[in-house]
Amino acid sequence: MEEKARVIIKKVKKKSHEGAHGGSWKVAYADFVTAMMAFFLLLWLLAMAAPEQKASLSEYFTEFNVFESKSQSSGKSILEKSAGVIEVPKPKPLPPVAGRTSTEELARKMRASIDAQLQSLKNQVFVDATKEGVRIQIVDNEGSEIFRLGSDEPTDKARQIIRLVCENIRDRDNRIVIEGHTDSAPFKSGQKTNWELSTSRASAARRELENNGVDPSRIARVIGYADQEPLFKENPRDLRNRRISIILLQEGQR
């Protein structure tokens, strides 16, 4: 009899493309997207922050020292979990050198004085402590200008604010810088542009300081910046970019 042919079945395993690379790329991609979302959220929060809040954040990260904070916590970790709450150490106190402490105290005193005596105008005055010293910025608001339109003549509101500023700085020895700023709206009247306008307004503020008892020899610089240094960079035509900055320099600065 003729022998029956044997039937052989061969199983072939197909290698999946995913087997070579795995699914790790999905995890990495998800981490990347999460990080980008966090980054843009941070940018959005910074854009919404007020200038004084930005200055406080800048000062915190400038002065914070991770090593000293750790040593001051008696060996505890910087982020210590206690009953499910993460505690962040407070920044170290500012060292009493180069007039830094007095600068911050003066800024607080100035802010408190303005809040107490200029309730209706306090939103037009920003006070902060910078590397240069105490900066007082007097800004325009809708319907409440500090200079008449196209003029370097201060309004009564501007004179009122400058008079209060002088009460807080008149008896100090620190030198003073006065800056004039405009918004980016084009201005040209004859030979006058935003450059001339910002400079003449800074000089008008200088005269007001001197009229209120500030020694003229303390004036270090009077500068006009036109629209080159807006306070609100995201909107160069914001009315609050029209402002006068009075900077009380730290001791020793010229």
Image (tube, rainbow, N blue to C red):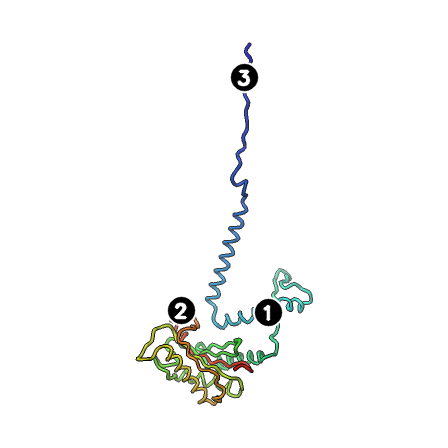
Distance from disc 1 to disc 2, alpha carbons, whole Å, reads: 31 Å
**Label 1 residue SS:** loop
Picture residue at 67% right of the left edge, 64% below the top: 76
**Label 3 residue SS:** loop
- Which residue is the extreme one toward the left? 190
Which numbered tag is attached to residue 88? none
Please state which of residues 44 and 205 is positioned toward the viewer in this rendering: 205
Picture residue at 46% right of the left edge, 66% below the top: 47
Count all numbered tags in the image, as a single digit: 3
Q: Amino acid at mark 3?
A: Ala
Q: Where does label 1 land, which residue?
A: 64
Q: Amino acid at mark 1?
A: Phe
Distance from disc 2 to disc 3, alpha carbons, whole Å, reads: 88 Å
Q: Where does label 3 land, which residue?
A: 5
Q: Is residue 145 left or right of residue 26?
A: left
Residue 222 figure quarter: bottom left
Picture residue at 65% right of the left edge, 63% below the top: 77
Q: Where does label 2 land, which residue?
A: 235
